[in-house]
Image (cartoon, rainbow, N blue to C red):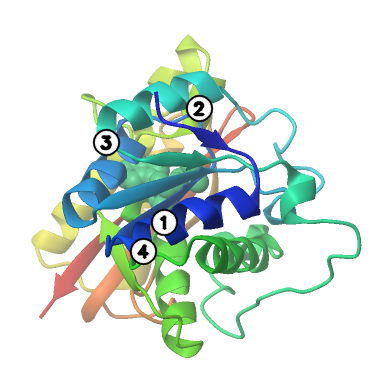
Amino acid sequence: MIPVIKTVREVREHVRAWRNEGLSVGLVPTMGFLHEGHRSLIERAVAENDRVVVSVFVNPIQFAPNEDLESYPRDIEADRALCTDAGAAMIFNPEPAEMYPQGFCTAVDMNGLKFELCGKSRPIHFSGVCTVVTKLFNIVGPDRAYFGQKDAQQLAIIRRMVRDLNMPLEVVGCPIVREEDGLAKSSRNTYLNEQERAAALILSKTIFLGQKLVDEGERDAKKLIAAMEANIATEPLARIDYVDVVDAENIERIDRLEGEVLVAMAVHIGKTRLIDNFIASVE
Ligand code: AMP
């Protein structure tokens, strides 16, 4: 089994030794309770780097007080087994006090890209993400870092942050991994009871419907959103947070589908908030 490292100092010692051997380093940031979606990122990182660090940290500063910080599922031994099997070299699993010691008061924030989609209902979320990801980059110093398209707005924001602040690494985006029936894999799927799990299929079904409509030529964002919302409304357990169409790079709303567009949604199934999306390249 690979080591589970708790301190910044020890991570740096390991990485320094690897660097002395001339080895490249990949980083996969996660909140743990790892599944096949995370595994796909880790395997990609293992294929492209000599050593891979997986961080497992449920980052308190990206959760609002009414969100699921306390109940977020955790199982570090299962995560360790998955990471070992996938070929990672180390897990970094700090306590909150290691990341945010007394007196911590610095933030990394965006002046764009965070205002639409998830940023509307989670206004502090992306500042928390940017801050922790910056810290992880500074702690590990990877050549490449791996993020899932599942969190499309997060991926766009991290790409922009790295570009804006000249962070010396490559950001690699990885495709969404789904359950056999279509539901996007998520640690939060464990919150769903049997009935909710069946109802949650409305997300991926609506994503596939949206994809089909775009393939068939729909270019009007309002019409696309209306059709997708109407589809979600057929599921009584579903409550829409948003369905929206934005420019994939700048995360700004658009009326007509043109270029790289991101079609994204967040839907509550009971108490669980789930997200899904697709990217379309439109002529
Ligand atoms: P999380 O632990 O949910 O914060 O996710 C850690 C990383 O794994 C993020 O970059 C996510 O986008 C990615 N990820 C989570 N679920 C999936 C999935 N179903 N497919 C691909 N990547 C995913």
Give the mark, 2 or 3, whose residue is nearer the N terminus: 3
Q: Is the residue under label 3 in contact with that under label 2 (CB below 8 Å)?
A: no
* Nearest-to-viewer mark from 1 and 3: 1
Q: Give the distance between the C-alpha atoms of the residues marked 1 and 4, in whole angstroms.
A: 5 Å
The three-letter code of the residue at mark 2 reads Pro
Q: Measured from the top left, where is residue 122 in percent x and y?
A: 66, 58
Give the mark, 4 or 3, whose residue is nearer the N terminus: 4
Q: Measured from the top left, where is residue 76 in percent x and y?
A: 54, 25
Say the numbered circle drawn on residue 279.
none
Q: Is residue 87 left or right of residue 63?
A: left
Depth check: give the residue in front, 164 or 198.
164
* Nearest-to-viewer mark from 2 and 4: 4
Give the mark, 2 or 1, whose residue is nearer the N terminus: 1
Residue at point 83%, 56% (across, down): 101
| Mark 1 lies on residue | 17
The residue tagged with tag 2: helix, strand or loop? loop
Q: Measured from the top left, where is residue 120 in percent x and y?
A: 63, 65
Say the numbered circle drawn on residue 87.
3
Q: Give the distance between the C-alpha atoms of the residues marked 4 and 3, in whole angstroms.
A: 18 Å
Q: Give the distance between the C-alpha atoms of the residues marked 2 and 1, in whole angstroms.
A: 55 Å
Give the mark, 2 or 4, whose residue is nearer the N terminus: 4
| Mark 4 lies on residue | 19
Crowding around mark 1 (Cα neighbors within 10 Å: few <14, some 14 to 19, many 20+) is few
Question: Residue lying furthest top in this view?
Answer: 194
The three-letter code of the residue at mark 4 reads Arg
Asked whether the viewer can see residue 253, the reply is no
Depth check: give the residue in front, 150 or 163.
163
Asked whether the viewer can see residue 195, the reply is yes
Q: Measured from the top left, where is residue 21 in percent x and y?
A: 29, 60
Question: Residue lying furthest right in this view?
Answer: 103
